Amino acid sequence: MRTTRILLAIIIAATITSCCNMKSVTSLAQINGEWNVTEIEGKGLPESDSKPFIGFDAEKKSIYGYTGCNRLTGSISSIGNNGAIDLSHTGSTRMMCPDMSVEQDILTTLSKVTICKTEKNTLLFCDKDGKTVMKLEKR
């Protein structure tokens, strides 16, 4: 019984800290360009012709993208030394689409992001607890 609890604690700790195993992003230049959204809250996106992405323009200090239905836009003041980032100040166009679930998931998840990590062609957005909430791959 005790062994089971210890094993469970290790698994939970590894899951929560998965974002900590990658390098912190310390400048917008590191994430400049466009990134395809591949997972939200650990779940892959449904197959679709519309591919959501998030882009960063380091020179303009801006965020832009496509949520699967609408365009996304916003600004970023800076990224902290520990990968701290605030993506909650974004807006989007307001077209209606047959399925708005992916868009809603993306917008809700972006408001939770506080940490940005990267390794090679993968970008992870993590919440205040270090849990990965969104995974992106370089386009």
Image (cartoon, rainbow, N blue to C red):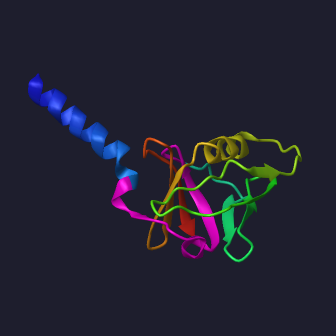
Which residue extends farthest top?
1
> In this rendering, is residue 28 above or below 15?
below
> In this rendering, is residue 105 above or below 54?
above
> In this rendering, is residue 25 above or below 29?
above
* 64 part of magenta stretch: no
Q: Position of residue 13 (x, y in %)?
A: 29, 41
In the rendered structure, the answer to whether residue 96 lies left or right of residue 61 reads: right
Residue nearest the observer in this picture, 122 or 23 = 23
Q: Position of residue 110 (x, y in %)?
A: 63, 48
Residue nearest the observer in this picture, 32 or 40 = 32
Judge whether residue 69 can be spotted in this image: no
Q: Which residues are magenta?
A: 20-43
Q: What residue is at 72 percent from the left and 46 percent from the top? A: 103
Residue nearest the observer in this picture, 86 or 49 = 86
- Where, quadrant-wise, is the C terminus in this rendering? bottom right
Q: What residue is at 65 percent from the left and 52 percent from the top? A: 87
Judge whether residue 50 can be spotted in this image: yes
* 32 part of magenta stretch: yes
Which residue extends farthest right?
95
Q: Position of residue 88 (x, y in %)?
A: 68, 47
- Where, quadrant-wise, is the N terminus in this rendering? top left
> In this rendering, is residue 37 above or below 128?
below
Q: What residue is at 64 percent from the left and 44 percent from the top? A: 111
Residue nearest the observer in this picture, 93 or 86 = 86
Tag count in the figure? 0
In the rendered structure, the answer to whether residue 45 lies left or right of residue 131 reads: right
In the rendered structure, the answer to whether residue 125 lies left or right of residue 91 reads: left
Q: Position of residue 11 (x, y in %)?
A: 26, 40
